[in-house]
Structures are given as C-alpha cells and as structure tokens.
Image: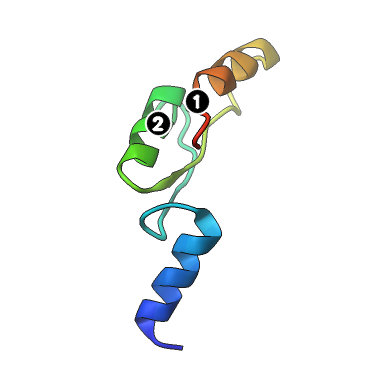
C-alpha cells in the first residue's frame, strides 16, 4: 500500500483532516483543547482520569458536537 493510500485510510477512519490522534494528557486535554485540535484537523481525546463524574459530564457537554 502506498503512503498516500495509508494517509487517506487514516483520514477516513478518524474523520479528521490529518490521520493524527492527539492522546489524552491530564490537565491539558480539556474540552477547549479538544475543540481547537479538531478545528486544526487532528482527532482529539478528552482527558478524564482525574475528574469527578460530574466534571466529566460537564467537559463532554463542552466538546463541539462535530468532534
């Protein structure tokens, strides 16, 4: 498989402009950060390991519906 084919396969799978996954990073990967990553074309992950269930719900509600 050619490199460009792999890139396209990754883009289709992730639904993002670039086949890049930004892993969750505690204290950094907030809803705002995830939204900005998505706007830049990267697939984001929201960090929730240090949050209470209520805070997780609040952060998830602040993530853009497009993500």
Residue under the point 58% across and 13% down: 58
Query: In this figure, what is the number of numbered marks?
Result: 2
The residue labelled by disc 2 is 35
The local crowd at label 1, few if under 14, some if 14 to 19, many if 20 or more residues have their Cα within 10 Å, is some
| Residue 25: image location, x then y, percent | 45, 36
Extreme-right residue of the structure: 53
- The span from disc 1 to disc 2 (Cα, nearest Å) is 6 Å
Q: Nearer the viewer, residue 26 or 19?
A: 19
The residue that label 1 is drawn on is 63
Give the residue drawn at x 53%, y 29%.
65
Identity of the residue furthest to the left in this view: 40
Mark 2, Cα crowd under 10 Å, few <14 / some 14-19 / many 20+, is many
Of residues 46 and 62, the one nearer the viewer is 62
- Label 1 close to label 2 by CB (< 8 Å): yes
Choose the circle earlier in sequence order: 1 or 2: 2
Q: Position of residue 52 (x, y in %)?
A: 65, 14
Q: Secondary structure at mark 2?
A: helix
Instruction: Give residue 12's position: percent from left, percent from top.
Output: 50, 62
Rendered residue at 42%/79% (across/down): 5
Residue 52 or residue 4, whichever sits in front: 4
């Amino acid at each position: 498989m050619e490199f460009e084919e792999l890139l396209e396969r990754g883009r289709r799978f992730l639904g993002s402009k670039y086949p890049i996954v930004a892993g969750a990073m505690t204290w950094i990967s907030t809803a705002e950060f995830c939204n900005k990553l998505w706007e830049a074309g990267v697939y984001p992950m929201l960090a929730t390991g240090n949050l209470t269930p209520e805070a997780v719900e609040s952060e998830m509600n602040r993530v853009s519906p497009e993500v």
